[in-house]
Image (cartoon, coloured by chain):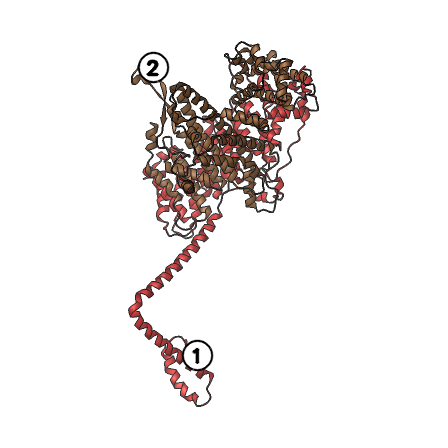
Amino acid sequence: MGTTRRRGGDGGMEENTMAILDTSCFSKSTQHIADDRLSFLEAVRSGFLVPENAPAPTNKIYKEIFQILRVENSLYLIMSSYQLLLEFDKRFPQVYLSTVKKSESSSPSSLPFNELVVVEEAWSPFSFGTDVSPSEKEDHDKTSGSLDPIAFNLLIQDIIKVPDEANTEVQDTKPLRNMLLFQYLVSFLEGDFVTRNLSFKENSDWITLRESFLNMILVSRKIIYKGLIKDCLSAMCQLYQFSMDCSHDLRPQKTESTEVTEKCHTDLAIALPEVVKRTCVSVQKFLLMIIELDSSKKLADMEGWTTRADGVRTPAMEIIMDELTYDKDLLFPFFQALDKQPKLKLDMIVQYFQKYIPKTSVRTRRSSDSTSNSTFGGVLKSFSNGNNTKGIIKKMSTEVAQLLLAHAFQAYISLPSQDSSESKEDDNDDNSLPDVCNHMISAFTCLKKTDGRMVVLPFGKEALFTAAIMLSGNSGV
Amino acid sequence: MEEDPFDFESDALLASSPAVAPKKRKKVIGLDDLLVDHYKEKKRVVERESKLAKTKKTYNSDEEEEDGRVAKLSKYVDECHEKMTHLSDEDDVSIWGLQVFGNQKSPPSFVFTDLQTCSLFHSFLNHEVNSLVELNIESVETFFEGLLTNGWLLKLVCKCGQVEKPIATWTFHLMLYSSKEVLRSAAVDFWCAILSLKNKGDSPPLKIHWLPKYSELKNALETYGYLLISPTKDSCDADMDLGDSKYMGPPQNIRAWIKYVAACSQARNLHFIFSVSEAEELVVATICLFMDRQLLGLSVDLYECILSLINFFKDEEWTASCTKIAKAVALRIPLDINCLRAVECIPAVCLHAKQLRSTISFRILLGYFNKVEDEEEVTRQLTLINLKDKTCDLFRDYIYLVLTENWFLYNPVLKEKTLLNEMWGLFLRNCCCQINITDTRSYASKVRSKASYLLQVTGDTLL
């Protein structure tokens, strides 16, 4: 049904709305072009979003809106096109699951299952044309309106520069536009990938997942995959740092500037912190998707669904762990910035600890060392006696150990399973909230005992306070 | 010499000159003679030229005509171009945007010592873990700031099942008045989270011991320099005290305010924060915030806020509230390009919002026509407009077009009223037919293309 709805989009509607942009007969001022673009967006909105059973916009219309988001300088137009694209993706998904009752076709006993529906020839903000030479690239970009993987990577590199650009005197809409563009692209990738991944998990169909835009970007030979991941890491840290630092008002102090320019500076200054924060969340989402894709691919590899064409790619998690190991300056900015994905954060810290916890100590502790080693509870237990602790802080300083433990604890209490106040039943005893809290406190006590000069850092203090209150609150109820 | 010397057709010159010349030549050659000679000479030249031209003309008449036409055409093009640039200059003037904020006031004072009285802090002071944490009365504020920004505080209040008054007032104050981005954004996240927290299973619901009243939200807005509280005070008065740009509102906290209002309206079933009439005022204030170009970048949050506010109302409350809001908005927004923004800022995605958009459009239209109160009369007035009239204000007609479009499009009841629809159709056709495509008046082409677009889109229902 969805397919017919999209393809059924009537040409008259497209022609009428597109005509709004074509009214130029004399050389027009930029204000006129902006006006026309605005009425175009407004017409598209009222034509395709307002009626309950409106057809999906045609590719031409999508392209035009996306073009406005990519090139426009007026904040108003950027915001309108950005919002419109997001709403369209929500209303007219290009990939979705539709429930099919299998009983109608063949086997009467089977349960209804979800079938993946991919809208054919749908517009996408990405293009993977291989026949475009670099010299033609600029022209190509302008005409097709879509980004290729190189342009996407360049966009991420531009985002890394945002904090620097925002601190200089010259303020234009480019940083803001780039961030919104990136947010939209991630949301688009997400809509595509999450549905396909769900279908992969249900129907074991690797082909559809291979064709997801995310996978196509990552396997593209045009970009250096490792570089892309590293760019994401630095973008995330830079943005987070910036959003934490901007305590002062960003608006320019100069008063001699005219009313209009000052206003347009203020609007950027007011919007910036929020957009930066959301972009940081988008980068996290993007990384998480890559990691999920990796694990799906691993499964497909093991089942033998992949072919040689799929190639070999280092899992993103490994690249990130390597980066964190070799670039110590990245460690805490990264974990601090990773504030919206507690599960990923906890997994990463536990993995990081595994590199430093002496293997033997864990083996003697439990017969099934793999489970104990790979949980937060297991990591905390490694800090329960003096010898072990000494061994660990020989390799990493007490400061690092403290902060990592506190970050892991922060992620642990933010897990969705903790919100429901009942810990998951499949967790082992080491991972229940009271145990984790107790072990947190004893781990810190042990650290302090082992290293007498250790000063508990503020973040560690907060974690300890929380652990103590969590325990007393528990006993009180 | 009253004759025109260049009037060569005149007989007077030809006739008189030979008669006068011989008489005077006998004396001295006077100035007049010289002049006459000069004329004679000139006349001869002209005659010769005209003869030449006549002979030429027989061969080259086409070319010459062409030249003339080209000259004429280029002159027209120049004129048109001039008019067009003039025209676009005029249009540039009408950009929406209101001065919604003036000078900020100093924020209300706040005592942080309260924080020491909360049991969360006290219960810990004698805890054995405090030997590691070393928390004391002096460091309490900094410590709690850390708890807040790193998200611990939220987990703690969830665990304890209550938000104590000192914590509630402290975080609320940080949210609305702190100049540190870290604190205000952590505080607003905290408040949005505790307001939306639903009780799960058998655990008792979260008790918030202090909830801010509507007046606190209103005061905050006034502290930010909000000017449009009452309809009598318009933006002109505000220009008086706009001196120091350093104190110009709104501060960055406006973002927190917007998010918080959205969270409050979504939490109506869990917490009582403002009444229906207070929510009405908040809708009006939010629409006014849309009018400030400084807040353009927050449109995502503003959309979320106004939608939450609109859906705060129950269906049975909405019809009355909608009209009240529309009336208040129509009173506050000046009758110019800004009123279009007031209509278009309302996202027409749900029934309540569509109704509001339609009602506001209608109320503003009423403001344009004096002493007109019913729908039929408004539409009749529209059909009476003569767009051919040179004095007709096409900009105003453009506003009528957009307002009426919104009024009709989002009101399902109007579809049944044939008379109204016929008159609306007539107005649209008037806008199309009465404006010539070469009309260079300001907004002529806009009115024309807008009307023809609307005719195309709504054609089947109207005709």
Q: Residue A232: percent from the left, percent from the top?
A: 51, 31
Q: Position of residue A381 (x, y in %)?
A: 59, 13
Quarter of the N terminus of chain A within the rendering: top left
Tell me which amino acid carries mark 2. Answer: Ser
Apparent side of residue A106 relative to residue B394 in the rendered image (left or right):
left
Residue flagged by tag 1: what amino acid is it? Met
A34, above or below A54, in the image: below
Which residue is painted at 51% across and 35% down in the image? A157
State the image coordinates of residue B164 (x, y, percent, origin top left): 62, 20
Check residue B374 in the rendering and tell me which mark sits there, or answer none: none
Looking at the picture, how far across and down is residue A7, in whole percent? 33, 32
Chain shown red: that is B
Foreground pick, A355 / B96: A355
Whether residue B280 appears in this view of the structure is no
Residue labelled with disc 1: B1
- A218 with respect to B217 (left or right): left
In the rendered image, the vertical position of residue B277 relative to residue B67, given as above or below: above
Crowd around label 2: few <14 · some 14–19 · many ≥20 (10 Å):
few
In this rendering, does residue B106 appear at all? Answer: yes
Callout 2 secondary element: loop
Disc 1 on helix, strand or loop?
loop
Examine the rendered structure and indicate whether residue A164 appears above or below residue A323: below
Distance between mark 2 and mark 1 Cα atoms:
117 Å
Residue at the disc numbered 2? A110
Tell which chain the image draws in brown.
Answer: A
Q: Is residue B232 left or right of residue B126?
A: left
- Between A168 and A213, the one lying in front of the other is A213
Q: Nearer the viewer, mark 2 or mark 1?
A: 2
